[in-house]
Amino acid sequence: VIAEMDVPASDAVDAQTAIIAVFEAQYVRFCRLAYLLTGDAGRAEEVVMDAFARSLAAWRTRAPGQPDAYVRRAVVNLCRNRRRRSWLERRHARARTEDVVMVAEPIDHVWAAVLALPPRQRAAIVLRYWDDLSEAQIAAALGCSPGTVKSQLSKARATLSGVLGVEEDS
Amino acid sequence: MSLEDRLRQSLGAAGRALHSDRPAVSELEARAHRRRRRTALAAGSGAGVVVIAVAVAIFAAGSPHARDTTLGAAARATSTSSPAGHADNGGAPGGQPPTTAGVGQVTGTTPSVGASGSGSSPPASVVHPNGTTTTRPGSTTTTAPATTGDVVVTQDDAGKTFDLRVGQRLIVNLQGSGGWDYTEPASDDSAVLARLSGGADASTGDATATFRGQAVGQAHAMWTKDPPCRKANPPCMPPTALFEVTVNVV
């Protein structure tokens, strides 16, 4: 309660305005980010709306900072959680019936290899090579250190290099 | 082509393939508002945990009827305490916005719970055992003149609207009677209506909270109440009744 009251009302209004500005300018971009992380267009839009709603609700009581980075982190977190939940749902569905048909969206083999990576490596790769973020920015989005990002990227590149039969840049 | 170039090319093409229309800002604001309200209600969701614990205990005791009834309520309590209706807790860094008190989830004995008990005002909404929600249309609206003194409301003021100046205080005093317990009122938007203090007395069923108009806007002070049969063994599992007053901070 004290933390809430420490935030001046004017800051809360500024924060709200900032989140809405990011929503208007970058909604589609965040949808694409979520799409690349989940491989599911419908789920991507749901995740992004949820991330913006959470951010808008939370920022009514927090001082402004970098709203786009804040929303990006929410999107990445939700994609990781949703993907885990959908995996559990599929596993339970298979346990109930043997003839479950999974309809996958058409994707190219490079993206398919990225989607097969562990969640954190996948997020690091997408943020690095699609969003062109620095290691420090990726660390902020993933909630880890830049050193961890570097190691995750290295492992991911090694895996992708093997799967795709392509050599890494030095 | 190097691995990095192939990744850029492939991910770029995949991203561009997604075409999405941005929803209206009003849709986002409505969604955020609903989330704030759910979060405020779920604050201090200890009662939900208690209901689940009771459900487990009764399950072990083996009463089929009690088991069904209790688990239904436990499911409702669980869904209420999960603000976005998701099992996950992922989301924005820092997670949930700080919430203002509220000692737990409360329910009433019957669907007409709002008309009984110590207060005569009907609840703003009732969540029925089948999962449907009934929202009371056309709340009685009474606007109190904005003054410099404190605005004091009671359970009889549920559904009304009050004006409050920035800096002015709103005091909610709820008096339990006949075994009915009120929960500590919470604000659904602390940026507009900040809670300063409050508490609930389990022995009397009374609850109180003091708010302050923080910024111009509209917010709600909300509370719920427990019927006497919630103290029975096994406890009853009736629908959830929500009460609120609307506050316009001017």
Image: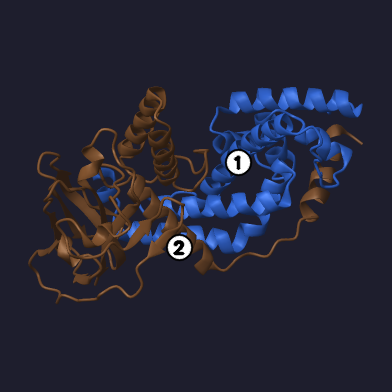
Chain colours: A blue, B brown
Number of numbered discs on residues: 2
Identify whether B196 is placed above or below B26: above
Q: Nearer the viewer, residue A28 or A147?
A: A28
Q: Quadrant of the C terminus of chain B?
A: bottom left
Q: Tell me which amino acid carries mark 2.
A: Thr
Where residue B43 sits in the image (x, y, percent)? 32, 44
Which residue sits at x=75%, y=34%? A97
Q: Disc 2 marks which residue?
A: A17
> Which chain letter matches label 2?
A
Answer with the quarter of the image where residue A146 lies: top right
Q: Is residue B162 left or right of residue B27?
A: left
> Which chain letter matches label 1?
A
Q: Nearer the viewer, residue B83 or B80?
A: B80
Where residue B64 sits in the image (x, y, percent)? 43, 32
Q: Disc 1 marks which residue?
A: A76
Q: Tell me which amino acid carries mark 1.
A: Val
Where residue B29 sits in the image (x, y, percent)? 47, 63
Q: Quadrant of the N terminus of chain B?
A: top right
Which residue sits at x=79%, y=44%? B11
Q: Are marks 1 and 2 in contact (CB under 8 Å)?
A: no
